[in-house]
Image (spheres, grey):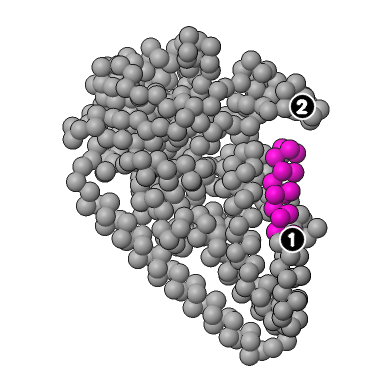
Amino acid sequence: MGTALFQLIFLSGTVYFTLDPILWTEVILIFLGLPIAVWIIKKFSARFLSPALASYFLLILLPFAFTFFDHMQARFALIPTYIMTAGNALGSSPFVGLASAGGLIALSFFVAIINMLITTIILQRKNRRNIISLTIAIVLLLFSAWIFSGLELRKNSFAYDNLANSFTVAVVSTNNTLSSDSFAELAQKLKSRKTDLVVFPEDIFDRQTSSLVFQNVAKDLNANVLAAYDTFQNENTLKYNSAILFDNQGNIAGIHNKNRLTFMGEYWPLGNWRPSFYLWLRGKMPQTADYAIFSQENAYKPGQRNLLSANFSSGQVLFAAPICLEIQYPGDLEKYKNSGARFIINESSNRWVGLGTNHFIYLTNNLRKIEAVWLDLPIISSGVKDFAGIILPNGQNNSIDYENNIKNYSIYFGEVKY
């Protein structure tokens, strides 16, 4: 019960913008594996150890057990919940460099160890000598981690700064009311600076409009263009959410079909059954009427993990283009890097987020920083109701906020090394 209450309170403080009963119940049920593991450890240790040693044995194993179930619920939830894991909070901290030792799992384990030591202090509150020793241990651990983090970030920064090749990029983010007039103005602004690649957010036009518009932009700018929108393939029988790369002649140079579909919005595995709560939600939010949960014919097909190849002055360069919540699968990003990706581009749309949009973006950017440091790759982000910019392998976030612009869009001009 304590574990369930902890997870419920933790969820309420981190992801109050997704008040979804199915998702929350599933996440809590997965995390309840932690008290079961604690029970097994206690039963096992009681056979071989004294009560005092058994307690310390449990404390030692708790960071491992907590980290394991923290990431089990993040990985196997219907919607990935890595942004609400304990370690994700360190994405905006001086300890983000610890990610180089093991990504988000390393950060979560570090948090769990600190919490374990604090718990031991509470249990030993009557023993002044032990309290002093444990406090010194925490201070030394924090200081050592801070030093290690700084060294790793500087190492990543040095390696990135000394890469031989680079290209220029224009990254676009918009609000959810971008008009055709605003887009025409946006296109003119893009012409003001020569760029090798232009990145647009997910889903700013309908499917029929998108292909022609982005083809023309690519030809007008003489640049590669990456855009994400719905496509129908295999003789228009299969619907995908696709990231499409156009070359500077307007030809399609590559397509990534979204592999990790979004629960409810893009797929619904329970047929025509749905809780009454969702029917109430549809009445309050008419824009959800086209979600797969309400309209099975609008469901998407999952694609395959694949890389795209852009042609720059130095030659062909491979990169990954995870769409929206696909950025929240660190294991997939690691596979992309191992397959040869030199950078990552994440196009997204946060139209579905109402209350708590800024907090959601903050948590997502924490995860992007952790992934950039861990994989030693730059991550470009572009979105509707999102930041536009580049997160470097040293965790530095070079981006601009769409809300800080008097227009319906923002453009970040920068350089990416590879």
Q: CA distance from mark 2 to mark 1?
A: 31 Å
Residue drawn at (44%, 73%) of the image:
144
Residue 35 is tagged as 1
Vertical position of residue 239 compared to residue 26: above or below: above
Q: From the viewer's perspective, is 156 left or right of 67?
A: left
Based on the displayed image, in which of its 4 quarters is residue 288 positioned? Answer: top right
Residue drawn at (40%, 32%) of the image:
306
Give amino acid for label 2. Answer: Arg
Q: From the viewer's perspective, is 26 left or right of 373?
A: right
Q: Which of the two labelled residues, at mark 2 and mark 1, occupies the earlier sequence position?
A: 1
Q: Secondary structure at mark 1?
A: helix
Residue drawn at (47%, 21%) of the image:
229
Which residue is under mark 2? 274
Q: Quadrant of the N terminus?
A: bottom right
Q: Nearer the viewer, residue 386 or 4?
A: 4
Few, some or many residues within 10 Å of mark 1 (<14, 14–19, 20+): some
Residue 190 x, y percent position in the rendering = 31, 26
The magenta span reads 20-36
Q: Nearer the viewer, residue 137 or 48?
A: 48
Vertical position of residue 62 compared to residue 25: above or below: below
Q: Secondary structure at mark 2?
A: loop
Residue drawn at (52%, 57%) of the image:
105
